[in-house]
Image (cartoon, helix red, strand yellow):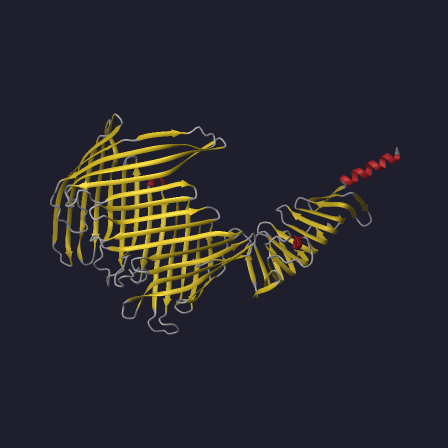
Amino acid sequence: MYRLKIVAFVIIASLYCFTAKAQETYVHIKASHVSYNKKLSTYYAYGNCTIYDVNYVLKADKVSYNEKNSEAEAKGHVFIKDKAGNWIRGSYAIFNYSTYSGYIDNAVLFIKSNHLYARAKRIIVLSKERYFIKKGAITSCYCPDFVNLKGGAHPKWTIEAWNTYIVKDRFLNAYPVIMKVRSVPVFFFPFFHRNLNKKRKTGFLMPQMGLSSYYGFKYIQPFFLNLGPSQDITFYPFIYTKRGRGIRSQYRFWWTKYSKGKWDITVYKEKIPYLTSAHRITRVNLKAKQYADLGRYGYFTYDVNIVNNRNNLRVIDMSNIETSSDRYTTSKASYYLNYKEYFFNAYAQFYQDLISQNNRATLQEMPVVKFGVINKKIYRNLTLDFKQTISNDFRIEGKRGFYTDSTGFLSYPFKLSHFSITPKIGAHQIYSRWRIAPDSKDYTRRAFVPEYDLSLSTSLYGIFLTDNEQGFGGLKHTIKPTLSYQYIPERNQEFPDFVSVYSKTNKITLDLENILTAKYVDNGKTSYRQIFYNRITAYYDFAKEYHTPFPPIYEETTIKPFDFLKFTSKAHYFFKKHLFLDSSESMDIGNKKVGFTVSYNMSRDSDYNLNDESVNAKVYGYPLGGLYVYASFERSLHYSYYPSRKFGFMYSEDCWGVGLDFYLTRSPEEQDDGRYQTRLDRGFWLTLNLTGLFSIKREY
């Protein structure tokens, strides 16, 4: 009987030995064998030992715990883990459960939130959050030999530091540092800092670097300034060794759930030529955007784009160096409010002329006010649409003034059999008062212009189903023809150029849509995909002289028979000349491994002369695992040159990635005499990512 009591006591002790209180926390010990030395106030545990409290769990082959100083000594297969999932593995440890400090020999530390491993002969635990490592190696790559403390282990990359100080979820400081790829040293840093806090924090970001035949070596050093949880500023000081230096700043804000925006300001001190102070030009560009949803009080937006030098954003037509394809920058602000069928809109627009010597003759819309009612039911289907426009148009030199346009329509939509019919009758009342600046003489004019509209539309359906229980299940063919007529009689509307007028119109329009929708069944789940869409719009205006019964028609087509193939086309075709006035086609072929995109664009001027024709193409693929390669080009067929050619690669694995983006671009450059010439720029941008530590990205 006495022996049975002893055996029972040993079994119970091996499962749960004691609970000791130490500074308001309870420490528990579990092991196969536990003994207690009352004189030393120390517990000794052997075999599958576990000692833990609410914050830390320590496991080892052997553990001794002193209940007076709350210090544990662990030997053999030591493993310490906190409640956040961070752990340390080693061969020997001293750990104090009162101060949560100690050290672990031959150790590996894992920080879960940043997926970082640190290995050293000794890792010192200073507190719950702080570690100090002497002569340690840090990596985010998982290497079994490295983690299991085997000799000769070389992860894909490591940074080795003489001193490393880590504060969990805050930062990592290391100095001096040698970066290694496998066992080969590649970089030296006197000091390295890494923010481990996933929350935004003020500090320097990793630099951006590239090389250009025109700009020279490019270096950008971003600095992030945290202004709070909903706004920040990032500064991008940059140096182009051949062309100059400057700074770009970006202010981002998200003041409320429905109000956000950003401001970009760039100041660029350009030096021409290299290493001289002659012909210095300071270029300043401001871009600002904001969208604010004010709820029942409406919407407010602005989009500002201002340059101090008209040539900053000038885009040159390569066939004629004196012409520009992008003449103006536009800055605008708008406020919109609606309540049921009623609306109010006020906006202003400011233009900068990038071609003229000054902006004195540029027309500005400042401001324009519109209000009215849309689709207001008066009686049964009788509907009223009314819009009042008041516009003030200003320029320093030339015609300027204001005008009003009062437009009202009555419509009565109804159905007759399978047809939807909508007759509309309305009128436009225009009034304008203007002067020709700098002359102070005023001119006034008014006009009354009636308008009559009629539209007829219907939809036809055809459904073709299969008996398949898996895969293709059938087709639905939809045809939507719409026939409309618009008549505006001729009225005297000799207004200045800033007034929107209504020219004589006697136009009939046919719009025809064809849609094919496919049905697919996959394991009992049904899905639909539009595999074909075509729209043809043809019109004839009897008030105009076409000298042909067939004026240009509009065509739009989208074909997507498979997930990996898509073709789109948009064009205007003129039967009389048997040519396209403009066209845009594109084709995309691709899956998760490889892809190809090509597009063609063409346009003609009012005299049917070709003024643009270009091809864009890009091919990309993943030939090996995490390797991504691509090549793209833009070719002007009309002017026989390449505005842009690019190619590069990005190789990524679980803990690192590296990439290079090469480019050859042509762009205009202003000469000393004011003329423009094109120049070729060759270069590359570097991308380097070490997961958990830093990322060097391509140009912003």
Q: Is residue 418 left or right of residue 586?
A: left
Residue 648, relative to residue 566: is it above or below? below
Residue 458 visible in rendering = yes
Residue 74 seen: no
Quarter of the figure with residue 436:
bottom left
- At a point 36% along the width and 40% down the height, the residue shown is 295
User: Horizontal and vertical percent for residue 520?
Assistant: 44, 34
Specify whether 489 is left or right of 531. Answer: left
- The answer to whether 413 appears left or right of 254 in the picture is left
Frontmost residue, 247 versus 550 = 550
Tally of numbered discs: 0
Q: Where in the figure is residue 381, as x and y percent of width and height?
A: 24, 28
Residue 98: percent from left, percent from top: 69, 50
- Residue at the farthest top position: 417
Farthest-out residue, right: 2
- Coordinates of residue 60 in the picture (x, y in percent): 73, 48
Quadrant that contains the N terminus:
top right
Give the residue displayed 34% in from the left and 62% down from the top.
Answer: 667
> Which residue is painted at 23% across and 35% down in the image?
483
Decide if residue 259 is on the left or right side of residue 525.
left
Question: Which is nearer the eye, 596 or 401?
Answer: 596
Q: Which image quarter holds the C terminus?
A: bottom left
Q: Nearer the viewer, residue 58 or 591?
A: 591
